Amino acid sequence: MENENKQEKRNILIGGAWPYANNSLHIGHIAGLISGDVIARYYRQIGDSVLYVSGTDCHGTPITLRAKKENKSPKEIAESYHEEFKKCFEEMQFSYDLYTKTDDEYHKEKVKELFKKMYDNGYIYEKNDLQPYCEKCSKFVADREVILECPSCGRETKGDMCDCGYEPKEEDLLNAKCIECGNKVIAKENMNLYLALGKLQEGIEKYVKNKKANWRISSQNESEKYLKEGLPEKAVTRNLEWGVDIPIKGFEDKKMYVWIEAVLGYITACQKICEKRNIDWTDFWKNDKNNSIYMVHGKDNITFHTIILPGLLLALNDDYRLPDYMIATQYLNINSEKISKSKGNGITIRDMLNKYDSDMIRYYLIGNGPERKDSNFSMEEFVATCNAEIVNKYGNLINRTLKYKGLEEIPDGEMNKEFENKIKNAYIEVGQAIEDLEFRKAISIIRELVEDGNKFYEEQQPWKQQKENIEAFNSTIYTCSNLIANLSNLYEPFMPMASKRVRELLDIPNASWEYIEVKKNKEIKGIEPLFERIKI
């Protein structure tokens, strides 16, 4: 296991995918991102140096279209959702070191420097090509700004992606209509900048081959499929008014394509928080720095992280470490249906936070989430799981131990050695599961430990021991108190609020990843139920 006999503190960088500021976060977004917080909290507990960064993706066509529809500026739309996202992540206890946004001035200036470096290195080049142009609106139109008949299924679709899964090609867009005025577009020459992915293919292939063992199978398969098809040149500029300026002469009328500046945000966010803390950002992003890089995202963003981001890092030609671990989460369906804006079947995380404890939401989405295959969310299952596993088992163990009638302090008992070994083994097994990116397994190991604790309590029958053998009673309560103390450590990456409350009750200074024992004769007071049963 990586954390055993660890001599030197490692530098762990975790990048959570940047949600797009065009709609509220639903529980599928959280299910796809929460793994990053589990990893961040765990590595902090074992003593590594951790930076966990993300932010709001603020630019691009959908935001400008929404702004027009709502008679607002794109900045107003983006800022509104950014503040909403920040609040939701805070209430969900995501422990970001920095949650920023692509509209941040620091990001924009730094990403322009990176863009210019790739241009100077010869990996971004100029190309004149035909693009859809609306004569009535007097502008080049993006794929989301046109409608066309899908060549695959025949239904009407926007130019970015049809519901049937077909992704319209450039030639398809030339037969489209402008979504704003309904006028048929024409093909017109337009000078853009392109990323030479073909020149980078060999390096990306080598990277995928070397690192894919650390990735989930969906990341491996999608990346290999993309590489097999051959990496196409990819436009990095667009005719937009809202976005990051192009630092190349002659392209003042264009902005950066949102995908390139958003993925480079992992670097700029790291630079910004390191600058603020007066630490060296290269310790997290450059080679030979005793570092590891984790990328956390949904399966619809796989190639942006496994192909595009490594390609950009190679194009910088500046000794960047390429990401080690790709944590792609599958889809979370609602009542067996894929979450769809058109169907309106998504449950927002705001709706959940208004009704339920954030630890319960976290526990369920990690323990039952779409880790390696699509999973299903239903309110009935959520309620049943939380009541059975959190309230009835974990909450009950705490209440029956620390609120035992007449108990005013932690008794001066002896720790049951068999249970001490069980706890110590749990640290090893849970830690290994987290490092193996098996978060559902990690929660199940802790759940079994809680069940063993309740079983031990029942077998010892402290209500009889108190009358017949006070020493045995003291040891039973002391053993269960120590179990609860260690559960506050083990559950910290998963249910941080409850773990914090337990530590406060038992006078434990901070979360660690090692076996601990509570202070004997410590006064116990103010014990309230950690969780309330959910009623529907």
Image: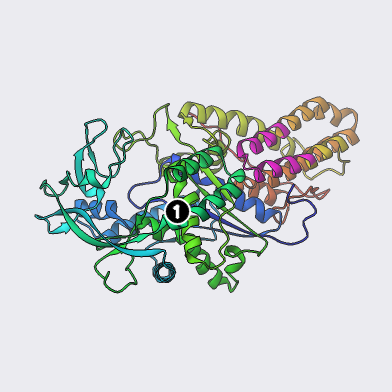
Magenta span contains residue 169:
no
Percent of width and height locating residue 87: 44, 53
- Which is more toward the observer, 304 or 358? 304
User: Which residue, given by chain and number where applicable, does mark 1 sit on?
Assistant: 308
Report the predominant secondary structure element of the magenta stretch: helix
Q: Is residue 323 left or right of residue 241?
A: right
Please indicate, yes or no, whether residue 23 appears anywhere in the rendered image.
yes
**Location of residue 452 with respect to 270 vertically, above or below:** above
Please give the name of the residue rendered at 45% of the width and 36% of the height, measured from the top-left corner: 331
> What range of the chain is rendered magenta?
425-449
Percent of width and height locating residue 510: 70, 55
Magenta span contains residue 447:
yes
Label 1: few (<14), some (14–19) or many (≥20) C-alpha neighbours in 10 Å: many
Name the residue type under label 1. Answer: Ile
**Location of residue 276 with respect to 385 vertically, above or below:** below
Q: Secondary structure at mark 1?
A: helix
Q: Is residue 477 left or right of residue 286?
A: right
How is the model colour-coded? Answer: rainbow
Please indicate, yes or no, whether residue 357 appears anywhere in the rendered image.
no
Please give the name of the residue rendered at 65% of the width and 44% of the height, measured from the top-left corner: 434
Please give the name of the residue rendered at 69% of the width and 54% of the height, measured from the top-left corner: 45
Percent of width and height locating residue 37: 57, 50
